[in-house]
Image (cartoon, rainbow, N blue to C red):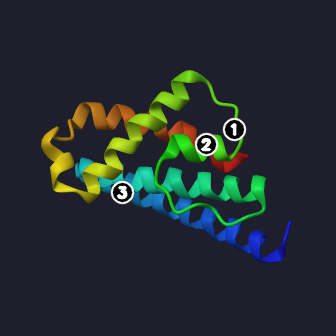
Amino acid sequence: MLKDIENTVRLWREEAVEDMDLARDILARNKYRHAMFFAHLALEKALKALVMRATEKLAPRIHNLVELANKAGLSMDEESMKILAVMNFYQMAGRYLEARRDRVDPQRATENFRRSERIFEWLIGL
């Protein structure tokens, strides 16, 4: 792997861990929309690191977690892919007012956070 790619992969991974730590802190403050946005961001960065490792090219500038998982060539079960698809909603809700029509439900967000956290730990372990 090219040295620049290796360094960028390392940076993506470090930032992913930092963003997930921040998401946990924000969730503890009951700021669900913000916590979920950062959880999505952590997953996105972890996946981009894996895309770069798999392709030896810069990761695409996209936010879709399912697409990133596919580009990384990951073999994930259907439930994990569904969680990634659900998490895509939270990045939209964090960015755009019109996406907030369906308010972030605290109970559902907490459940989705815990599921995404397990996927995140798996991704970081790869």
Q: CA distance from mark 2 to mark 1?
A: 6 Å
Residue 68, percent across and down? 58, 47
Find numbered disc 2 in the image and state the secondary structure of the residue it sits on: helix
Quarter of the image holding residue 8?
Answer: bottom right
Camera-nearest label, 1 or 3: 1
Residue in the image at 61% along x and 42% along y: 69
Residue in the image at 32% along x and 46% along y: 90
Residue 25: which numbered mark, if any? 3
Residue 126: which numbered mark, if any? none
Q: Amino acid at mark 2?
A: Ala
| First-in-chain label (1 vs 3) | 3
Q: Which residue reaches farthest top?
A: 78
Q: Which residue reaches farthest bottom?
A: 4
Residue 115, percent across and down? 46, 33
Task: Judge the density around disc 3: few (<14), some (14-19), many (≥20) Cα neighbours within 10 Å.
Answer: few
Which residue matches tag 2? 69
Residue 79, percent across and down? 52, 23
Residue 74: which numbered mark, if any? 1
